[in-house]
Image (cartoon, rainbow, N blue to C red):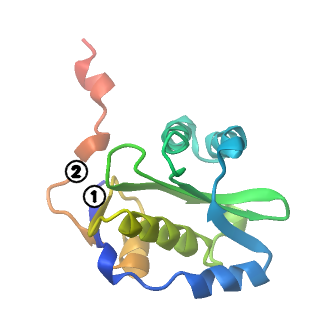
C-alpha cells in the first residue's frame, strides 16, 4: 500500500460536519489521557493489535494526538496522528455500524486540522488502504514509489 500526501493549508472546514454529527448524537473530540485504556482496548478489539499499539503512542503525545467519535456512551471511531512517525496521519477507523454517516470524514479532518495547527503544511498518510476516501475527503494524492514504505515488515526481513 502506498503513502499519500495531503496539503494541510487547503482542507475543507470540519465544524459544520461535527455539528451535524452532534445533532445525530455522535460527538467528535480529542481523547482524554484517562480514556487511554478504553480507547486502545476498543481499537485492539475492533481493528487489531497493530493499530492499538499506534493508538497507545498517540496518548504519549501532548496534547493527545488521538480523536474519538462516540455515541450512546460507546466509542464508534478513532483517528490518530504522529503515532508511527512525525507528520504521519493514521491510523483511522470507524465501527462498521457507523460507517457512511460522515464519522470517518470528521475524524480525518479533525486530525489533519490539528496537524496544520502544529505548523505542518503537508501531512503523510502512511500505508493507505482506502485511497479514494482520502482523495475525496482531503485531496490526498498518492506518493509515487512509496510502497511498502515505513510499514514494511522489518521483523520478517531480519528473521533468519
Viewer-proximal residue among 33 and 11? 33
Residue 121 position, x and y percent, is 26, 70
**Residue at (38% x, 81% y) in the render:** 11
- 157 above or below 110? above
Q: Secondary structure at mark 1?
A: loop
Checking the image for residue 47, the label placed there is none
Mark 2 or mark 1, earlier in chain: 1
| Above or below, 83 relative to 66 | above
Where does the N terminus fall, quadrant-wise? bottom left
Residue 52 appears left or right of 2:
right
Front residue of 116/153: it is 116
Mark 1 burial class by Cα count in 10 Å: few <14, some 14-19, many 20+: many
Tell me where residue 50 appears, x and y as whole percent.
49, 37
Residue 70 drawn at (x, y percent)? 74, 63
| Mark 2 or mark 1, whichever is nearer to me | 1
Measured Cα–Cα span from mark 2 to mark 1: 7 Å
Q: State the SS at label 2.
A: loop
Identity of the residue drawn at 55% across and 38% down: 56
What numbered label is drawn on residue 3?
1
Point 52% across, 70% down: residue: 110
Which residue is the site of mark 2? 147
Q: Residues within 10 Å of mark 2 (few under 14, many from 20)?
A: some
Q: Find residue 117 and report its image quarter.
A: bottom left
- Judge left or right: residue 63 versus residue 20: left
Circles 2 and 1 in contact, beta carbons < 8 Å: yes
Q: In the picture, residue 73 is in which quadrant?
A: bottom right
**Apparent side of residue 143 relative to residue 114 in the rendered image (left or right):** left
Amino acid at each position: 500500500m502506498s503513502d499519500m500526501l495531503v496539503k494541510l493549508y487547503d482542507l475543507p472546514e470540519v465544524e459544520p460536519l461535527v455539528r451535524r454529527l452532534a445533532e445525530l448524537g455522535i460527538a467528535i473530540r480529542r481523547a482524554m489521557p484517562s480514556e487511554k485504556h478504553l480507547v486502545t482496548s476498543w481499537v485492539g478489539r475492533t481493528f487489531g493489535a497493530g493499530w492499538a499499539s499506534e493508538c497507545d503512542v498517540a496518548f504519549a503525545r501532548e496534547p493527545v494526538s488521538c480523536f474519538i467519535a462516540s455515541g450512546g456512551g460507546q466509542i464508534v471511531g478513532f483517528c490518530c496522528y504522529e503515532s508511527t512517525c512525525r507528520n504521519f496521519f493514521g491510523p483511522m477507523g470507524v465501527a462498521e455500524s457507523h460507517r457512511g454517516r460522515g464519522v470517518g470524514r470528521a475524524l480525518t479532518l479533525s486530525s489533519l486540522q490539528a496537524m496544520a495547527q502544529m505548523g505542518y503544511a503537508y501531512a503523510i498518510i502512511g500505508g493507505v488502504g482506502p485511497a479514494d476516501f482520502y482523495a475525496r475527503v482531503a485531496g490526498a494524492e498518492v506518493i509515487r514509489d512509496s510502497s511498502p514504505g515505513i510499514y514494511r515488515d522489518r521483523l520478517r526481513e531480519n528473521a533468519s
